[in-house]
Image (spheres, coloured by chain):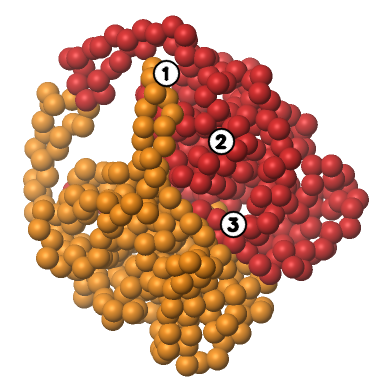
Chain colours: A orange, B red
Amino acid sequence: MDLPDLRVAPDPADPRLTRRVSGRDQTGAVVETSVTVERPLTLYLNGQEIVTMMTILDRPEDLAVGYLLNQGMLRTDDQLTAVEYDDDLGVVVVRTERRTSFEEKLKKKTLTSGCAQGTAFGDLMEGFAEVKLDPEARLRTSELYRLLHRINTVPSLYLEAGAIHGCALAEGDRPLCYMEDVGRHNAVDKIAGWMFREGVRGSVFYTTGRLTSEMVIKTVRMDIPILVSRSGFTAWGVELAREANLTLIGRCKGKRFTVLAGEERLIWDAELSYLEEESAKHWRKNAREE
Amino acid sequence: MDLPDLRVAPDPADPRLTRRVSGRDQTGAVVETSVTVERPLTLYLNGQEIVTMMTILDRPEDLAVGYLLNQGMLRTDDQLTAVEYDDDLGVVVVRTERRTSFEEKLKKKTLTSGCAQGTAFGDLMEGFAEVKLDPEARLRTSELYRLLHRINTVPSLYLEAGAIHGCALAEGDRPLCYMEDVGRHNAVDKIAGWMFREGVRGSVFYTTGRLTSEMVIKTVRMDIPILVSRSGFTAWGVELAREANLTLIGRCKGKRFTVLAGEERLIWDAELSYLEEESAKHWRKNAREE
């Protein structure tokens, strides 16, 4: 499939990202399979060691910048003077014009939504209230379905080796950037970092992960007005989305979805022909114009 | 289904765990649905504030103890003198006979496997090398299938509201304890805490989550010799499992699975009648005795 606007996508053929291992299957037969490789990456900001994270290490610079942005350690008006990755040491160094020091921030962590990165509570909400998401942005359901289809056909490590989470930034039905990693939050942070370094914006953020409070807050801070996931919601995620007027679309499976916030951005234009996924014998047509 | 050994299971009817919200579906029709509620829980150990985590708050004491154990802040030979949960404050206080202080530990975090809890690198591996998992433990594939079936029929929040991860401790094909939470690591830590407080052991740990390095290390530290997941593997998880001789079974779907470590504990006794999941028209019989 030709996706001319897709500037970044995973390279499942990159030999560093997967490894072949043998084992047995359910019949007891010996099998060989691919598994995803995760490596440690230590991040320094202006000489201060911040964290070591496990990642598939395909986009260390984007991950470093995105992590710092989403943790509130880097500000959107900061000038980056250096982003240097040393492959031998597994280290990435970020430098800014502004002097930084995070003794207090690093001490006190909040594990948000379980699947956590120890973001300090105050910092998580910082920047959230100030963002005014574009109220004029629109997404047609026909565009949503086209986007989901395009995302699902991007070659990915998921198809190759599993155990991977993917995210994508899009403008309407056009994917711009697709990132993956073992950790969902790494994939999100990589896109945030890429957007910042490239100066790119988008109207839709897609994730395979759940629409938790942390996911909603990050999307709002990235100034993206529409968030889409095939997974489900949490109550606080819904509440925050409504507060920020983020369009929150979850449980996307086939043509089904539920939107629990920011519904006014959606235009229900798609003609819906329902396939019963369990049996090809039944067809139900349902067309609706709005 | 009668599961007499199942001592703890979620209570999806507990009104505090879900909330009803309205939105729209793919046809534009107004719908009402249940979403999972996560709340903050602040954990203190011997007067020191450790972390605030988001959780469904159904088992705060188990979560607190399990978190501390899995972070290496509580040792298996520690005497707990108090585990007190204050619902109004959203605080749980754990006290031990031994004096503790974690200034250094709290400062330096490693985000393991992306989906992280900021476990310090050294602590993660602490206790890992000393554990000698039971080499005599066995699991028949017929027991594995029965266990998976039983786990899948336990009433759960997942079925009610989605966006939930579940884990179970079992003895062979008998589930003993089933815990859920918004965060996968919370669910694992809850079981670890429950096992410690109740003095219960088990031979099999089941998770819906991926078999990352962190998941493998936690299972080994919990002294459980067999780890099962419907999700996939990472290379380092496989490597650590082989090092610790943990039986590592992943990608369990229907009757399919792949075992990549500790295969000698498995006994392939199940008769396999394959259903083609897409169409009921094709049947293939495959029986194997070992």
Give the image quarter of residue A2.
Answer: bottom left
- Residue type at mark 1 is Gly
Q: Pointer 2 indicates a residue of which chain?
A: B
- Report whether mark 1 lies on the same chain as mark 2: no
Instruction: Judge left or right: residue B38 versus residue A25.
Output: right
Give the Cα separation between the discs numbered 3 and 1: 36 Å
Q: Return the residue found at the far right.
A: B97
Give the image quarter of residue A216.
Answer: bottom left
Front residue of this view, candidates A221 and B84: A221
Q: Pointer 1 indicates a residue of which chain?
A: A
Instruction: Judge left or right: residue B281 versus residue B165.
Output: left
Q: Pointer 3 indicates a residue of which chain?
A: B
- Residue type at mark 2 is Arg
- The residue to which callout 3 is attached is B117
Does residue B40 sit above or below B225 in this rendering? below
Q: Look at 48% across and 48% down and name the residue there.
A: B36
Other residues around mark 3 within 10 Å, as few (<14) / some (14–19) / many (≥20): many
- Residue type at mark 3 is Gln
Give the Cα separation between the discs numbered 3 and 2: 24 Å
- The residue to which callout 1 is attached is A28
- The residue to which callout 2 is attached is B242
Question: Can you give x and y, in whole percent of width and height, for residue A161 in the image?
Answer: 35, 43
Instruction: Judge left or right: residue A45 versus residue A229.
Output: right
Q: Which mark is residue B282?
A: none
